[in-house]
Structures are given as C-alpha cells and as structure tokens.
Image (cartoon, coloured by chain):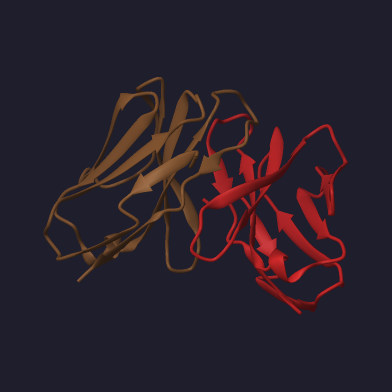
Chain colours: A red, B brown
C-alpha cells in the first residue's frame, strides 16, 4: 500500500512567494526523504530528515517532521521559476530498505 | 559525467515483443533499483540488487526479469510486453545503508502499441 500522500496535488504560485507541500504517511518510519522531479527527468534527492529530528534546513528548503501526526512538510522560500517541478516524499517502512513514494505535488512557479 | 545512465531513453514496440533496458552507475554504489512510474506519476519499486544479489522483489509479473552482471550494472528484461507495461522505468542506485539517498537515471519511456 502507498505510504506517503502529498497535499496539495498541484500548487501554482508567483515567483518570490513561498511554497508549502505536505506529506502524510501511515506506519512508523526511520527517516523521510523529499525528492524533486523535473519534467522528463529522474528524481533528485533534496533532503532527508530522521525520525528523531523535527526540522531541517538546506538552502531555501525547510523540512519539518511530526511523527505523532505522521506528517511532514516541505517549504520552499522565495520560489523561482526553476523550482517548477513535481515534489515527492518517500519513507522507509519501519526500517525497510525499500522506499515508498507518495503521488507527488506538482508545483508551478509563474515568472 | 552522468551518474546513473539508462538506455534507451525511449522504447516504442509492439505488444508481445521482448525488450531490455540497461542501467549503469558510476557512483561506486553497491545497491541498484528498478522503479515503474505510471501515467499518474505514481512511482513504485520493482526490484533491488545489492552486490549482485536480489534483495527486493515486489509483486511484479514474472515476465519482468532483472539481471545484475556486476554492482555497477542492472538490466531489466521484459518478455511478452502488454499494453499495461507502458510507463516510465527508472533505475536508481544508493549505498546499502538505511536512509541513504537514491540517485536516479532519467528514465526509459516505454510505449506499447
């Protein structure tokens, strides 16, 4: 069964605005990862947050994790047209080596 | 240099044919994966190999057969192709440790006529 569910499915914003995407999952995890997929390309790893972490930053990215609510959010600040892509969360299933991906959020940043 | 490379990028073929997709990584990783992404962008693991040994084998029709000649290569052979096999197939690699990021190729778009 699918582990992660992203919300919203699609998001359209203006350049310079912030974009927030959410991910919910169902079982316990050891870590959660976020990936970006540009159109026609493979997934690119953005950031990993472990189950004992609550927040992590990387450049304009901020990820939070709430294990009590089984949810994570990805915030992209000061968005750029180049951030236009689909964003996926991926979780391990209680320590499995297998990553389970959500359906993704399609982000469009309008110049 | 491309880290994870797949060939071919596009594959258009008739139902019933047999085809192969090749994948190579130059990252020195010991684990490789095949994923299938459907038309709704849902990405699902199919197989994973660690040091040439199969470690993940999801519920996939046995028409799909992975083969890893060495830890830098993972190929996918598909027999008797069906319409439902149309999808984008991604190869990925990582180090075999919990929580390691995976590095993806740019995919092979398979279209069955």
In this rendering, the answer to whether A40 lies above or below A99 is below
Which quarter of the picture shows residue B72?
top left
Which quarter of the picture shows residue B74?
top left
Task: Identify which residue is drawn at 56% across, 45% down.
Answer: A100
Name the foreground residue: A55 vs B22: B22
Extreme residue toward the left, this view: B16
Task: Identify which residue is drawn at 68% across, 44% down.
Answer: A33
Percent coordinates x, y for residue A63 in the rendering = 82, 49
**The C terminus of chain B: image quadrant:** bottom left
Percent coordinates x, y for residue A106 in the rendering = 64, 69
Task: Identify which residue is drawn at 79% across, 55% down.
Answer: A74
Percent coordinates x, y for residue A24 in the rendering = 71, 54
In this rendering, the answer to whether B6 lies above or below A105 is above
Q: Is residue B13 left or right of residue B22?
A: left
Percent coordinates x, y for residue B84 in the rendering = 28, 64
Q: Is residue B81 left or right of residue A4?
A: left
Q: How many marks?
A: 0
Extreme residue toward the front, this view: B1
Task: Identify which residue is drawn at 48% across, 68% down.
Answer: B40
């Amino acid at each position: 069964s699918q582990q992660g569910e992203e919300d919203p499915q699609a998001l359209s914003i203006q350049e310079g605005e912030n974009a927030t995407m959410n991910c919910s999952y169902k079982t316990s995890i050891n870590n959660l990862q976020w990936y970006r997929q540009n159109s026609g390309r493979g997934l690119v790893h953005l950031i990993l947050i472990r189950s004992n972490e609550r927040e992590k930053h990387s450049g304009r990215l901020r990820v939070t994790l709430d294990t009590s609510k089984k949810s994570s959010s990805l915030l992209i600040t000061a968005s750029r047209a180049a951030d236009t892509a689909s964003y996926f969360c991926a979780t391990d299933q209680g320590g499995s080596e297998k990553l389970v991906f959500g359906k993704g959020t399609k982000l469009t940043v309008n110049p | 240099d491309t880290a994870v490379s797949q060939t071919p990028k596009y594959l258009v073929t008739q139902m019933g044919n047999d085809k192969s997709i090749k994948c190579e990584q130059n990252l020195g990783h010991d684990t490789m994966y095949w994923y299938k992404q459907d038309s709704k962008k849902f990405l699902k693991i199919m197989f994973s190999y660690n040091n040439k040994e199969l470690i993940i084998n999801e519920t996939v029709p046995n028409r799909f057969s992975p083969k890893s000649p060495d830890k830098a290569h993972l190929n996918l052979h598909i027999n008797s192709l069906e319409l439902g096999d149309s999808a984008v197939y991604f190869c990925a690699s990582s180090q075999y440790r919990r929580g390691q990021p995976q590095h993806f190729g740019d995919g092979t778009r398979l279209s069955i006529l």
